[in-house]
Amino acid sequence: MLAPHGPQAGQIATLAWALFAFGSVILGLVMAAIWLAVRGAPRIREVLARERTIMVLGLALPVVTLTILLGCGVWLTRAQTGHAGDSLRIEVTGEQWWWRVVYDGPTPVMSANEIRIPVGQPVDFTLKAADVIHSFWVPSLGGKVDMIPGRITRLRLTAERAGVYRGQCAEYCGGPHALMAFKVIAMLHDEYDAWLARVADPPAARSTDIERRGQSLFVAAGCGACHAVRGTDAAGTIGPDLTHFAARGSVGIDTLPLTAENLARFIRDGQHIKPGNRMPEFRIFSSAEQTALASYLMSLR
C-alpha cells in the first residue's frame, strides 16, 4: 500500500501518510498532557483539570481533527469510482474460491484468476459476487472494494508501469480464502492489444497424439460440465474458463506455479493442495492418463 504504482494507489498512500502524521501529533499531545498532569507544576495541573480545557482538548479537538481527515480522505479518493471516458472495462466476479474475469468489448472475452491491463490507461472494474461477500484488493494499484451478492460495485485502477501486481480477496469468504489470490499484469499497449486479439480466438487444434488423448479424457471424464474451452464441446460455467489456461502463471489460483507436474498433482490431489476447493479429486486416471490430460491443458495457450 505504501509502494504505489498508480494514481489511485498514490492517493491512498498520501492519505495514509496524512493519517500517520495526524496520529503522531495527537499521540504527542496526549503524552505531553499525561506528563504534565502527573509531573507538572500545580498551576499547570489545575489548568488541565478545568472543564474548559477538557471540552477543548477532549471534544473540540477530536471533532476538528476527524473532520479535517474526513474531508482530506473524500477529496483524495474522489476519483476512485465511476467511469472515465477512455477507460477499459473489465468485469470481475468473486466466487468460492476463484475469480471470473470478462473483458468488455464487441465480443466479450472470458478468463479467470489473472487480469491483464494496459499501462497508463484507466481501467474501470465492475465487481460482483456470485455467492458470499468477497473484497477485491490490489494494494499497489488502489484501494479495496467489497463485492456483495446482488449488488454491483465499481473501482477504477491505473498502472503507471509494466509489471505484475499481486491482488487478494480481503474479506473472509470461508474455506481456502487465504489462497484466493490473483495477479494483475500490466502490459504495454501494443502487447496488450496483441494478447487480447489472441485470446479472443479459440486455441489452436491439438498437434500431438498425447494432447489429443488428453482432450478425449477431458471430455470423457465430464470436465466440460464445469469448465469451458472455446472451440470444443466443453461449455461449462461452474468453474473457471480454461480456453487459454496454459497462458496463465499458476495452478489452483496462484497456489502452485504452472507446470505439467503441478497440474497433474492438482487434478489428482487438489483437496490436499487447496483444501475446500469445489473441484473433486480425479484419482480415476492412471499415471499415463494424468500425463496426457496435463499435456492437453498445457497446450491451451
Image (tube, helix red, strand yellow):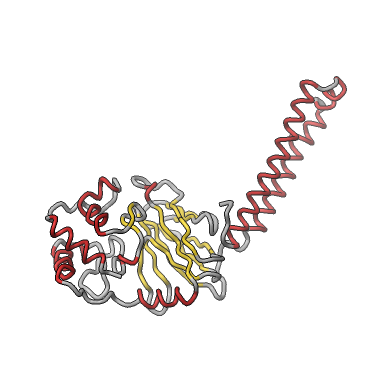
Residue at screen point 16% across, 70% down: 212
Task: State how many labels appear.
Answer: 0
- State the image coordinates of residue 158 (x, y, percent, origin top left): 55, 65
Identify the residue at the far right of this view. Answer: 43
| Residue 132 left/right relative to 67 | left
Instruction: Place residue 79 in its image quadrant.
Output: bottom right
Q: Nearer the viewer, residue 206 or 50?
A: 206
- State the image coordinates of residue 25 (x, y, percent, origin top left): 73, 40
Residue at screen point 59% across, 51% down: 2
Q: Nearer the viewer, residue 187 or 181?
A: 187
Residue at screen point 55% across, 75% down: 86
| Residue 226 left/right relative to 101 | left
Q: Nearer the viewer, residue 251 or 227?
A: 251
Q: Nearer the viewer, residue 10 or 77?
A: 10
Residue at screen point 65% across, 58% down: 76
| Residue 29 left/right relative to 166 | right
- State the image coordinates of residue 247 (x, y, percent, origin top left): 34, 67
Quadrant of the rendering where the C terminus is positioned: bottom left
Instruction: Place residue 226 in its image quadrant.
Output: bottom left
| Residue 194 left/right relative to 227 | right
Above/below status of 263 relative to 49: below
- State the image coordinates of residue 183 (x, y, percent, origin top left): 43, 59
